[in-house]
């Protein structure tokens, strides 16, 4: 889809489900959040890639390339910040940078940077 609104319309979700935060929305908000991040990355001119680990259910939502560096980006729709797939990817490939974007505040950790959803494109423009 080209944007969150089109994705929501195609899914035939009523505004009531979105506004009331029903269980249906809880199941769908991950997809909406990933769509939002895809829009932000594409409008900043980035090519988007996806990574799936062999023989595993692990995946990286987005991988972007900056010069010779590949930057994995894990998208979280809420404050549950477990990122097992991102950690496994980083352990295996040792990228110079790893990003988790979520509703949580900005914080730099030893092996990744958590960037709030609202500031992802600004962060990428200034850092990469």
Image (cartoon, helix red, strand yellow):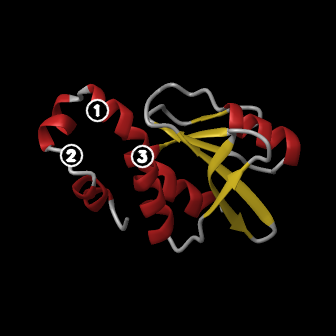
Residue named by callout 1: 24
Quarter of the image where the C terminus is located: bottom right
Residue 49 placement: quadrant: bottom right
Residue 52 location in percent, x, y? 70, 50
Residue 91 x %, y %? 85, 38
Q: Element at badge 1?
A: helix
Residue 45 is left or right of residue 39, and the answer is: right
- Mark 2: few/some/many CA within 10 Å (<14, 14-19, 20+): some
Q: Earlier in the sequence, mark 2 or mark 1?
A: 2
- Work out which residue is located at the far front of the displayed protein and give it: 55
* Residue in view at x 47 percent, y 26 percent: 79
Whether residues under marks 3 and 1 lie with C-beta atoms below 8 angstroms apart, the answer is no
User: Is 27 located above or below residue 98 in the figure?
Assistant: above
Q: What x and y, as percent, mark residue 59?
A: 66, 45
In the picture of the structure, the residue carrying the numbered disc 2 is 13
Task: Judge whether 48 appears above or below 51 on screen.
Answer: below
Q: Residues within 10 Å of mark 3 (few under 14, many from 20)?
A: some
Image quadrant in which the N terminus is located: bottom left
Residue at 76% from the left image edge and 71% from the top image edge: 67
Label at residue 100:
none
């Amino acid at each position: 889809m080209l944007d969150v609104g089109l994705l929501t319309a195609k899914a035939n979700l009523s505004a009531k489900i979105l506004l009331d935060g029903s269980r249906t929305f809880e199941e769908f908000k991950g997809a909406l959040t990933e769509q939002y991040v895809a829009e932000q990355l594409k409008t900043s001119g980035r090519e988007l890639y996806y990574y799936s680990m062999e023989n595993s259910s692990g995946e990286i939502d987005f991988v972007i390339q900056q010069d010779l560096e590949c930057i994995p980006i894990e998208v979280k729709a809420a404050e549950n910040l477990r990122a097992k797939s991102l950690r496994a990817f980083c352990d295996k490939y040792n990228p110079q940078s790893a990003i988790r974007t979520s509703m949580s505040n900005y914080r730099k950790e030893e092996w990744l940077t958590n960037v709030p959803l609202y500031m992802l494109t600004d962060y990428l423009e200034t850092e990469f």
